[in-house]
Amino acid sequence: MTDYTRVKAALPAARARLFGISGVHAVGIGTKIVGDEFTHEPAIMVFVEKKRPLVELEAEQVIPAVIDGVKTDVYETEIPKAHGEALQGGVQITPGSVESAWQGDQNPDGTFTIIPGSGLGLQGTLGFFVRVAAATPTVYGVTCYHLFGTPAQPRDTNIKLTVNDLVVTFGTNSSDPLITPGTLIAVEVPVTDLGYSLFGFYVVGQGDDGTTAAKQLRDNLNRVNTDMTCTAAGRSLTVGGSFTIATPVIATAFNPALGDQHSSLTATVSLPTIQLSGKANTFGGVIATFNLGGNEPTHGTCVAAKAGDSASTVAGALADAITKLQVPGVTADATGATVTIHGPVQTIDCQPMSDVRVGHPDNSFCSSWCSRCCDDRIGLLAFLRPELDCALVQLDNQQKYRAQVKDIGFITGRHDIVRTDGSFDPNGTPFWKRGRTTHVTKGTLLGANMSGKMAGVADESDGSSSPKWRLFNNYYTGAFAVKGDTAVFAGPGDSGAAIVTPPVPGVDGSTTVAGLLFAGSGQTGYGIPIGSIIDAISAWQNQASVALETATQMDQDVTAPGPAPAVLARVAHRDLTPMGTESVRLNQAQSEIGATSGGRRYGSLIMRHVDEAQNLVNTNRKMATVWHRNGGPAIADGLLRMLEIPGQRIPAVINGAPLVDCLQQIASALARYGSDALAADIKTHGAALTQLAHLSYPELLKTLQVAE
């Protein structure tokens, strides 16, 4: 342990000075590295994208060797990127390749025990568990916020931005001077004197043009700092101030989000209000985020709603959740179904979600025709903190789990890298992590109390004129960095993994949690300290006692409190009663398909064998394995989406394999384990049914209408 009092005192001024140097993307505390060897000498850690020889640098671009009596240490690494893709909730998931749920962890009663480190909803990793003390204790799984943060199906925007040093011009890609409503415009102003950037945001309203955008961004930027003196003339914004601004400024337009088309709740945002309408889905909810501009991160929260909850009920819960964030100067209240956010808010985004269920190891949920044994649900999204990149999943009652990290060890407590007594772990302290993609990797501490910026603020452009909408989170603070022993410490899908101390060798395999992996850049991984996460949860729970779930030995099953809901049963039984909006659409589709000659023929064929097929998946372990590994639940959910959205098709690739191959594997298994009659009909009609699976719903109806 090393005293870092002097380093901590020098850090604010050092950040202001260092972030003004091109290429510096993170600054924190650590111990100096000499000749690839870690020392115990306190230092200010400076992370740069690329080290450059002194002869290539201007005097003001040279990183000082000493700042306020504290040595600096320069480390070369890329700007970190988030290591996870958005889940988007429930039935919207497009499955990918993950470890099969059938590879162990199954209990004799057919339930599964969830273990951190082995996957979450296909696109991320489950980190660890916490328990909140209350009259009825509640257990939450902890993972990353950004796994839930991207609205689905973005639309293109027609805006074209032109930047010339300190001038941003807002034009369009077409002759229409109006900008596509819902476009998010962000202007970043790198201020050398401050050592960080100031941001201004604006969401385009109906009928807005380039002139409107320039004026709104001028006003928003001028409000975030009294030294800003931005002006607007026509479609051009000129950025100015009494401090030094690095040029050019950065301007980005983000495509409008189409949002969750399955949600029966809708949200209309008109700053500073959110107008909700409709009722919540069976597993519905709402995610709301807002930006204050300046150097503030994105703030946000979520609300899980019960089936049929009115817009007014959800609005009241959302207003309470926003106020409980305790963002300085920001409160919210609700009048009926209208939420009003008070404070210096520049943009608001509210995304109703039809499904806030979370699955482990992937997001496979039972449809009305799907086997319950393939339901991977573990709970519901309950809490978000964007600035910590932290999210909580409330475990379902009676869900079994283990307070251990897969392939590493059982958790005995927390490990605080930076402590309150003026000490911190020195560089070189070993840490491990176990993620969904790269599994167990090992490394050593590079720095603590890190502040810096993330690479980009949007998903990669998919060929459209602007990047997809991405909830804006460009900064991180209070983080720590780990240098991997190999070229890659973490990869896509590892986000949410626990960063832990190595298991005690030759003793009992115990480990402690240091933090939550949220980003990486090749050999370097970045984590949010466990203390920051626990404190945030405690504040959300009105200072209730929050404790990390621990164990005393390996493979200790723990059961989440509360009565077991029937929906969680993984034992063999049938449930052909559709839920919520699914029922209405299925009944309508059944009538439309039944009105065609081909639909009547194939419908009769399917009804002849549906009971046997579902029973096989429920009761035959080998059949269930084939069904699960070949994306059966995802195909069923894709079929439901196809019925609901014109032009939608079942994904052409399921679990990394062509849809036709998955269907053939499932059909072959049904023929192998089923009756002679089922095998005969699959042999006769299987190929034709497989071809129908490639069609959109309108194409399917047209094909069935002319079928003999």
Image (spheres, grey):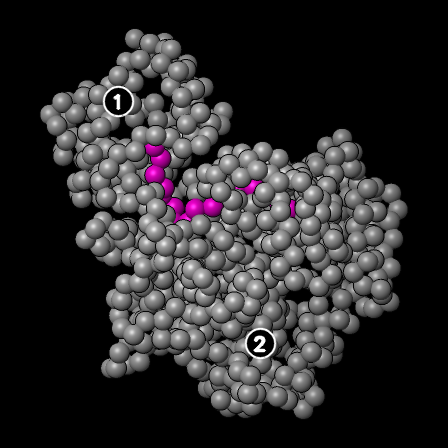
- Residue 405 higher or lower than 568, as above or below: below
Nearest to the observer: residue 390 or residue 43: 390
Q: Position of residue 186 (x, y in %)?
A: 71, 51
Nearest to the observer: residue 452 or residue 409: 409
Residue 653 placement, left or right of 614: right
Residue that carries the numbered disc 2 in the rendered image: 449
In percent of the image, x 25 and y 66: which residue is there?
555
Which numbered dot is residue 11? none
Amino acid under disc 2: Asn
Nearest to the observer: residue 708 or residue 360: 360
Q: Mark 2: few, some, or many residues within 10 Å (few <14, many ≥20)?
A: many
How far is disc 2 from disc 1 in space, using C-alphas? 60 Å
Could one spot residue 349 in this view of the protein?
yes
The residue range painted magenta reads 349-369
Q: Which secondary structure, mark 2? A: strand
Could one spot residue 375 in this view of the protein?
no
Of mark 2 and mark 1, the one earlier in the sequence is 2
Q: Which secondary structure, mark 1? A: helix
Mark 2–mark 1 CB contact (< 8 Å) = no
Residue that carries the numbered disc 1 in the rendered image: 606
Residue farthest toward the left in the current orientation of the protein: 676
